[in-house]
Image (cartoon, grey):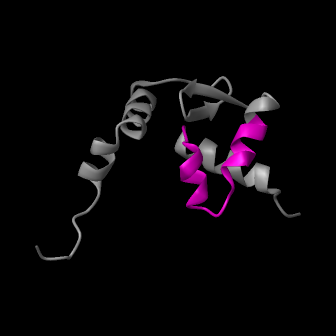
Amino acid sequence: MTETVSEQALTHLNQRGALRPRDLAAFGISPNHLWSLYQLGRVERVARGLYGPILADVTEQHTLVEASLRLPIVNSACSPPSNSTV
């Protein structure tokens, strides 16, 4: 049985613990699916532009994930350096 696009979005959300709509775009999933899941009550909005699983066990690590997703500077600082020369 094949997963629907909304089920794929939920799978990614459960694996990562929190997602931004643009994170789904990296998997080829329209951000509209995340909004639809929110409207259906299958995910919760934990912050502006950040969604998480319903009734997730929030731990220190979960809070760190949320913070890193909300601060683009942290995301780029944690990315591996590019091989380009300046």
> Is there any visible trace of residue 59 in the rendered image?
yes
Residue 16: x and y, percent? 53, 45
Magenta portion: prevailing SS class: helix
Examine the rendered structure and indicate whether residue 58 appears above or below residue 17: above
Examine the rendered structure and indicate whether residue 79 appears above or below residue 55: below
Asked where in the image residue 40 lies, by quadrant, the reply is top right
Q: Residue at x 78, y 49 (%)?
A: 6
Q: Residue at x 72, y 38 (%)?
A: 35
Examine the rendered structure and indicate whether residue 3 appears above or below residue 36: below
Asked where in the image residue 63 lies, by quadrant, the reply is top left
Examine the rendered structure and indicate whether residue 80 appears above or below residue 39: below
Magenta residues span 18-37
Farthest residue to the right: give it.
1
> Is there any visible trace of residue 42 in the rendered image?
no
Farthest residue to the left: give it.
86
Q: Is residue 60 magenta?
A: no
